[in-house]
Amino acid sequence: MTRAIALAALAIALLWPAPALASGPPDAPTPIDDAFQRLYNFDFAGSLSILDAAGLADPQNPLVPAVRAAVYLFVELDRLKILEAKFFMNNDNMVDGASRLVPDPAVRARLFAALESARKLAAARLAASPEDEGGLFAVSMSAGIETDYTALVERRTWRSIKLAPASLAPAKKLLARTPPFYDAYLAFGALEYIVGDLPFFVRWVVHYDGIEGNKRRGIEQVKLTARYGRYYAPFARVLLVVASLRDKKFADAEQLLAGLAQDFPENPLFRKELARMVNRVRSSPR
């Protein structure tokens, strides 16, 4: 049962990514694009600086505080070493009752203040236009961030499982558009993969509309985001690394990490994980 709960929690932990506003990169990068680029390079201060300027230029944009909350989440995940591959390989890290981490109360306060701002601005947009892309995106992202913080930092597994559907509903609306918002496939693909690895009785309890528990389908959906996503293509590649490691496909994990390290040379975690994987592949029996 412990392994089943751990896998369910891992599914929740992969829900942060939400739908993007376009199926491909814009002609010119927006401040939101730039903020995510800095985030993937682990330049958290640089990302926040971009968002400060974006908030002054467009104070009614709910994406600005939503992405700010994402930065604060990653600050904590990095500080507590939750983003390292070995964390996700140990199922015991993903259950209620695991050794407690000590969240930074100042970062937590900033994160939830940003989420509150994002939700208020998104609600205003959606009240005027229920299908507003920016509003739906901000709602989905905010739900995913709160879910991840609850699951990974606070280690409140079952609470995080209850929060997850709030992220999927707006993602489903955006996926129904034409053309599809390819980043939305990431949330569903991650759940398909993980739920497919759960025992049947747990899968029956942990139920999400539209999720069948098909691992192969899940991987293909994540690959769509990795190939066509606007904001979350790099994160999709990170999730494919995790899936490759859990499936013992170490050569695939090495190839993915090599690409991430090349694309985001300022990110020390990608370089460190790549070095570990190179050593593991070289030392494994052929």
Image: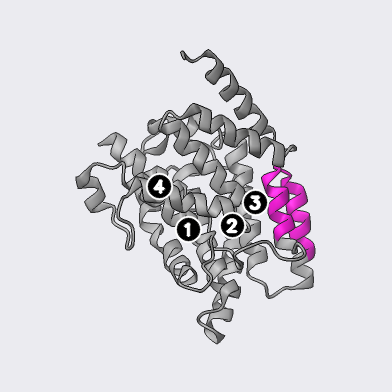
Q: Is residue 284 above or below residue 180?
A: above
- Specify the principal SS of the magenta part: helix
| Residue at the image position 30 percent from the left and 55 percent from the top | 212
Q: Which of 261 and 204 is in front in this view?
A: 261
* Residue denoted by label 2: 229
Q: What residue type is labelled 4?
A: Ala
Residue at disc 4, secondary structure: helix
The spot of residue 102 in percent (x, y) is: 53, 38
Contact between marks 4 and 2 (CB within 8 A): the answer is no
Question: Nearer the N terminus, badge 2 or badge 3?
Answer: 3
Q: Is residue 142 visible?
A: no
Q: Is residue 95 above or below residue 145?
A: above
| Residue at the image position 50 percent from the left and 82 percent from the top | 130
The spot of residue 135 in percent (x, y) is: 57, 73
Label 4 environment density (alpha carbons within 10 Å; few <14, some 14–19, many ≥20)? many
Q: How far apart are marks 4 and 3 (CA)?
A: 21 Å
Residue at disc 3, secondary structure: helix
Label 3 environment density (alpha carbons within 10 Å; few <14, some 14–19, many ≥20)? many
Question: Nearer the N terminus, badge 4 or badge 2?
Answer: 4
Label 2 environment density (alpha carbons within 10 Å; few <14, some 14–19, many ≥20)? many
Residue at disc 1, secondary structure: helix
Label 1 environment density (alpha carbons within 10 Å; few <14, some 14–19, many ≥20)? many
Q: Quadrant of the N terminus?
A: top left
Instruction: Give the extent of the magenta segment.
Output: 33-53
Q: How far apart are marks 1 and 4 (CA)?
A: 14 Å
Contact between marks 1 and 2 (CB within 8 A): the answer is yes
Is 46 inside the magenta-drawn segment? yes
Q: Residue 11 has which mark?
A: 4
* Residue denoted by label 1: 185
Question: Nearer the N terminus, badge 4 or badge 3?
Answer: 4
